[in-house]
Amino acid sequence: MTAAAASDSKSYIFQGIIDKPGAQVVGGKGVLIDIERDGKVYPNMIDAIGGAAVASLGWDDEEVQDIIAKAATETTYSYPTLIANKEAERLAQFYIENSPKGAFSAALWCTSGSESNENALRIVRQYYLERGLPNKVKIISRESSYHGFTLGAQAISWNPRIDKFEPYLFGRNTICLKMPCAYTYRFKNKSETEEQYSQRLVDQVEKMVLDNDPDTVAAIIVETLPGSSLGTTPPPKGYLKMLRALCNKYDIIFYLDEVMCGTGRCGGDGKLNCWENFLDPDEAPDIQTVGKTLGSGYVTIAGVLVGPKIKDAFMNGSKAIFGGHTYSCHAFNCAVALGIQEKIKRENYTGNVFEKGTLINKLLTDKLLSEDNIAGDVRGVGGFQSVEFVKDRVTKEAFDTSLNVGARFKEKCFLNGLVVMGMPSNPDGSCGDRALLAPSFVLTEDDAEAIVEKFVKSVNELTDELRAEGAWN
Ligand SMILES: Cc1ncc(COP(=O)(O)O)c(C=O)c1O
């Protein structure tokens, strides 16, 4: 049996669907991707999600091939805690110099977003030990959040994918406390302004801090713009500023997870960090995790950035970080990521995806919300957009999870030549099914219009199907 014949009928990979190979990528160029499924190749699909919001430069970028070749010849592996390298230093310097002045002082490079959050948790712990505050251990993160699939990252997350693993996670009522998510579409009261909603949410967090003894609270963690968990719901006005102020008041680390929304994905005017849309430079997070678009899928790289407050505590203390990973600050990965980031900056692709993403939002809003269909909300920032599907636009009732609306929508898009991420509704109805868009930064206006055209066609097809089933009217 040839290898090709074997892979058609059986999978050797223990991930996703394991009884057959499932859909496989077989090529890609720019925003287009070729996918083989059940023996058939679907060429030139528009990849509107870039893997999982990864492909900043799009597929098969020729300049990246040169960057990779150069990095392969010029870099040498070393175990980073024993022998460091110049490539990791250069990437850190680039990130810090291209963020608001004074926001960040140092970076640690990892190989995945989950690993970056694991390391950030260790940095939180060591930071308070350096300061002689060993009782500051509690972490406050949000309901309906996603910070990764390793156990520490799962513990600070909360979503229906996580609860099966609860026996292995830090205590939800003791160490990893959960505050309400910030979800304007569903949970802002009609009578409230966005600022009042933010104030209500932050008042709840302050009560939680006081009830749990501020001297034991270490960090507050939020995704600046939640991705898969809630579908790019922007923070209500003033929310992040109020959280930042609360952290200052009680000596708590303000920690933003920008693994999915950061590194150019949502930065207006070509900015690197998503929080720059909502916070002033002097309100920057103390710790920030990043990943995904940093290496554009060409290398596996993510990272933790720390602000001056964190670095200074270490500098005034042990001047060293406990532990490390074999592939932290990997020279080859850092060199490739730096080349990619330099190209994105030179070509202003971050500005481009912000503009085209904003256009997608406008076109989808105009075309979907003016017609009768299952779309309830169109939302996002720049290059990261979502549509939430509802049974009833007025009551915002979510579809029952058993109807698989998110997965079925993804399939409709697939058959129309478009790749999106489809997510299921929460079983308790606290979030509807949703589709996420995070295209490559290089997309053109024509690409944006083609994405919208295929997306709208898929919404209409699924609406008709659900109506025929009696699940929507
Ligand atoms: C906000 C956020 N944090 C962390 C992660 C984990 O990143 P990774 O899948 O690279 O481990 C993700 C992944 O989607 C994410 O969206």
Image: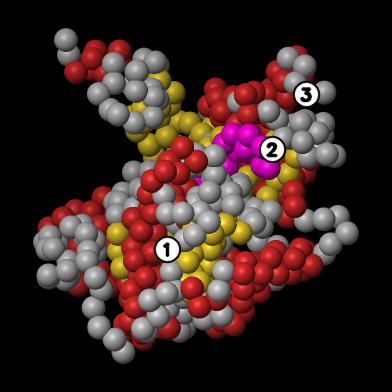
- Label 2 or label 1, whichever lies nearer to me, is 2
Secondary element under disc 3, as helix, strand or loop, is loop
Q: Is mark 1 within 8 Å of ligand 1?
A: yes
Image coordinates for residue 393, horizontal then vertical, percent: 81, 37
Foreground pick, 233 / 345: 233
Task: Specify the label residue 472 is tagged with.
Answer: 3
Q: Which residue is mark 2?
A: 429
State which region is magenta. Answer: 423-439
Query: Could you say which is closer to the camera, residue 452 or residue 245?
Result: 245
The residue depicted at 66 percent of the width and 69 percent of the height is 207
Give the labeled residue for mark 1: 289
> What amino acid is at disc 3?
Trp
At 75% from the left and 40% from the top, the residue drawn is: 376
User: Does 471 sit left or right of 406 as displayed?
Assistant: right
Q: Quadrant of the N terminus?
A: top left
**In the image shown, does 402 or 434 lie closer to the viewer?**
402
Mark 2 to mark 1 CA distance (whole Å):
29 Å
Q: Earlier in the sequence, mark 2 or mark 3?
A: 2
